[in-house]
Image (cartoon, rainbow, N blue to C red):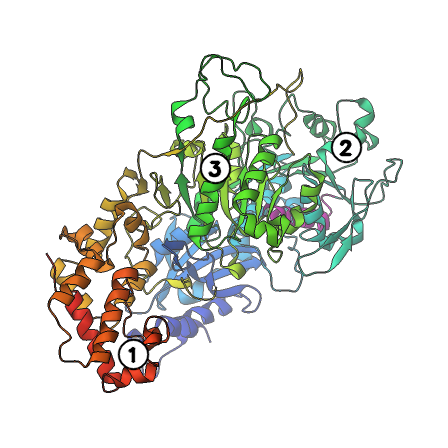
Amino acid sequence: MPPRARRLIGMDKRSLSERDICTKFITPALRHAGWDEMSQIREEVSFTKGRIIVRGKLVTRGQAKRADYILYYRPNLPLALIEAKDNAHSVGDGMQQALDYAQTLNIPFVFSSNGDSFVFHDRTGGSDPRETTLPLDAFPSPADLWARFRAWKGLDAEAESVVLQDYHDDGSGKTPRYYQVNAINAAIEAIAKGRRRVLLVMATGTGKTYTAFQIIWRLWKAGRSKRILFLADRNVLIDQTMVNDFRPFGGTMAKLSTNAKTIERGDGSTDDLTLALDKRRRIDTAYEVYLGLYQAITGPEESQKLFREFSPGFFDLIVIDECHRGSAAEDSAWREILEYFSAATQIGLTATPKETQYVSNIAYFGEPVFTYSLKQGIRDGFLAPYKVVKVHIDRDVEGYRPEKGQLDRVGEEVEDRLYNIKDFDRTLVIDDRTRLVAQKVTQFLKESGDRYQKTILFCVDQEHAARLRQALTNENADLVAENPRYVMRITGGDAEGQAQLGNFIDPEARWPVLVTTSRLLSTGVDAQTCRLIVLDREVGSMTEFKQIVGRGTRVHEDTRKYYFTLIDFRGATSHFADPDFDGEPVQIYAPKDGQPIDPPDAPPTDEDGLPLPESPGDDETIVDRPGVDQPDLPPPTGGPRRKVYVDGVGASIVAERVEYLDEHGRLVTESLRDFTKRALRKRFASLDDFLRRWNAAERKQAILEELEAEGLPLDPIVAELGRDLDPFDLICHVAFDAKPLTRRERAEHVKKRDAFTKYGPKARAVLDALLAKYADEGVLNLDDANVLRIAPFSGLGTPIELIRAFGGKPSFERAVHDLQSELYRDTA
């Protein structure tokens, strides 16, 4: 029966839910138009993960974006999107939301419906008028929308056959994310229409290699590309790719290498890599998919140019991974590979297109056919947000000038000039500075409560990485004694370190934990569980800075890694002020001397910088709650310059400001005290409001736990004030300017009031001991009977005997509550 002929018997259509409208009217209309319910119609399609929101240690996910209907001509080839509303809405009420979703999903045909009819919007511009109303029984068929799509894209029959080639399906249910579908389809369409050079820009951690695999698979299966070359510049990238994303190519795939290797996969199984070279570097040309390192197939000497063993027309498709690293530079040895195989289609993959006066990827590949930025990945919830800790060292800020006649470690006079941050660890070494960096990093790990969080420390060069490794070893001697791999250097010249790279990136391997490097780990390495990145070298280019940030942006839900921290000792995060940077941090914090290096909690904001509630809303899902189980560059020509080592100079932390992102996403300068005051006054409207809630709380500790869970632990402000204050006095003083009393002063006031006269000697002794314990340790849960098991109470009698002195447990608890009330009677 045509959908318009369907009638409701004994039911008001306007009373039906949105889901009823879908089931009874919209889905039947789609079936009537010829759409297959099993293979072409998907309902309630969530296409983002929900932005990660960090409130202190409490982590939530915002609501994922979800389309009511997406219609596919073939799997992963979406043509239409429908936004449904209940019949109390007008037919076009869902159109604006539908257009927003369609733009994100790159879907050309957009519909809105309330069950009476459809409003149809043609984003291709091929319809006149662009937006019109259709009866329920006039919904376009798959063939109709595909014909419109073909005309819009200008696809001839040959191009159409390539565009319609199916994706690879491994049967596991894994499907590409929406932006991967957009990237894959954009590349396939461009190549099908004859484009020879294609650039894809996708942020680190968004699955560029999986995207490349699907592109190659479809072109290979469609017969458009019969021989493929995949190039990268890290062995680990090639090996990971062969045993993971490219595994379906099986026996048709081989590595351009003479070194046999067995690789362990994520599921624990092992694969022996197939090699296309024999020991005499002769190539087996029987394979169809080749993977290789740039360095392995080219070089300055003619004998190193292995790629010339292939004929120029051998490959139909070349994919260049991480193409920002110079492969398209005109003076690059790698560029000659691309020019030699100029007849092949060439796809460049990068997280950061390189655009300088000297090098341009866009000039070589053309404008990107698809871009997915770091900012968009964070907003969608596919990438982890991050905090930044800016640490200023006096020698970096003020510079260092040697005293007249000062000698270095080998007895030579130090050149008399002002040395600055560009010199340190490159031409001049101050070991005290290196030790200070190690101390601050170790302090952060201890304060964070997790000394086993995977950490990458970026150093000036390999020698600096070795010194920082030693300094960290000394600062963490207890954990190094447990396992010497707790701290390791992993650089291009360190075979022992490189052998541990696989363990570092393995989420299930505990060691290594702290890894010092110079440039080896700055790109391409899939360190999913990296929670801390430390910059102790300058980062000159935006390209490299984005790549380094990308080492931490992967979300790893199994280990509850939802955000990461970046500690900057060299001012590298000044790149945030660059308009080319598109993934701002959620917080920037510069600790003063003596302050914790673990940042205090900043107020959360939404993706537009507007303030969010201090507590998670109904549309958020809590994903992590505190307390719940939870190759290096070659030296310049002319030989390396000797470093000057100067001893006994010293270094210390200086701090001039604390920076936070305000509600509008702007950096503001604010003291920790002002920040805490503002946050507390948002929670407690007045001093009376706080006193009322404090006195009404059975467990005073519960109020502090709530504050910490909502992103406001009080320990940092206690450390800054440096006074022995009860949390009660801390809040009254900081938030409401009340005169504070120390715990000892409060205890003395209670004693002077002689508040325990109604109790017997033993009960008074217990209360006096509780009061002394409060004065010394600030114990808030004084009514916990377990405290009676330890000294000095154990010397007064057994817990049962002591409780009996009060006449039983209820009387004991009442006496303790009276004691607490007496403690907090005085409020100036």
Left or right: 435 with respect to 717?
right
Which residues make up the magenta segment?
207-225
Label 3 vs label 1, nearer the camera: 3
Q: Is 223 within the magenta?
A: yes
Secondary structure at badge 2 equals helix
Q: Residues within 10 Å of mark 3 (few under 14, many from 20)?
A: many
Compared with 693, 236 (above or below) is: above
Alpha-carbon span between mark 1 and mark 2:
73 Å
Residue 297 numbered tag: 2
Secondary structure at badge 3 equals helix
Q: Visible in this render: residue 74? A: yes
Q: Which residue is mark 1?
A: 12
Left or right: 725 with respect to 428?
left
Relative image position of residue 429 (x, y in whole percent): 53, 26
The amino acid type, in three-letter code, at marker 1 is Asp
Q: Which residue is mark 3?
A: 437
- The residue sitting at 31% across, 69% down in the picture is 87
- The residue sitting at 64% across, 23% down in the picture is 635
